[in-house]
Image (cartoon, grey):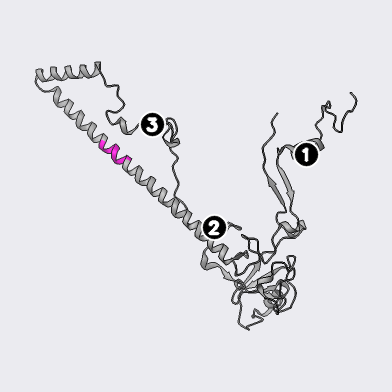
Amino acid sequence: MTRHSKNCTASSVYSYHEKKKDAKASGYGSLNLRYGKDGVKDFDCCSLSLHPCRDPVVTPDGYLFDKESILEYIITKKNEVSRKMKEYEKQCKKEQNELAELGEAEQRSQVEKFLNTETAVASPSQAAQGEKSKTANISGPSVSNMVAGRDKKLPSFWIPSLTPGNKETKLKKPDKTVFCPISGKPLKAKDLIPVKFTLADASGSSSSLEGKRERYKCPVTGDILRNNIPCAVLKPTGDVVTMECVKLIQKDMIHPLTGNQLKESDIIELQKGGTGFASANDQLTGKKARPVLQA
């Protein structure tokens, strides 16, 4: 068959180019996209809002956050845990009530069994009368679904948890620990350390830093801080210095600005920002799952 268009529809081979073209047009298949330089945050931006921090704080693992954003995150998580805890307590109370009802039902059954045994040793007339009543009950049982406590156990076809054949999902006791949204480690508000950046232009204001590329500098060496320059936070004062400066500090462990003694735990390596190079990022590719085209 002669080729009558750009893609021969009579071919038995579904080429990679045709597959990608059809996936782009129809929206099927997984979408992989490599981040560009503008798709990753800078070193001085909040890990949640992705904007330059107005009141920066850092976690013990070196992740930078805006104080307002991270406190709002912690409060939201605590409110969520509180809501889940109330639901869990409600479920536990319901289970206790069900166990109490089962205990009462078992006690009633034992009492009825005892009364039936006493009736068997009663007078023959009473026994015959009792047998007659039993045969009457057996011959004509009630078909109503509102007797013998069945009115409280009616299934509901509209509520999923009460649908016949569907067991109610049991909730687990929620964990009250708040985890860092980036590292996944436990995080507390008291662990956040204030950070102080040194402006590259001392005459400028911190309110107009959004569009500037060279915003901060090392207060010791004067080097401009960028995404490809490793930095660290000095915990006692919150100053951000370069790792080259840290190598000099580690010789005598004295703060270069205040002269106080430092410990190894007082030096927190700041997580670097992203760049357009794969070697400077842990993950530079985003993947989005879309509907799968099945044959």
Amino acid of disc 1: Lys
Residue beneath disc 2: 179
Quadrant where the image shows the C terminus: top right
Viewer can see residue 174: yes
Residue beneath disc 1: 20
Marks 3 and 2, how far apart at CA: 40 Å
Q: Report the residue at 15% width, 22% height from top.
A: 120
Q: Nearer the viewer, residue 110 or 205?
A: 205
Amino acid of disc 3: Pro
Q: Quadrant of residue 239?
A: bottom right
**170 lies left or right of 135:** right
Name the spot of residue 24 as percent of width and height, x first: 75, 40
**Is residue 165 a member of the stretch shown in magenta?**
no
Residue beneath disc 3: 155
Dot 3: what SS? loop
**246 lies left or right of 21:** left
Q: Report the residue at 51% width, 68% height from top.
A: 190
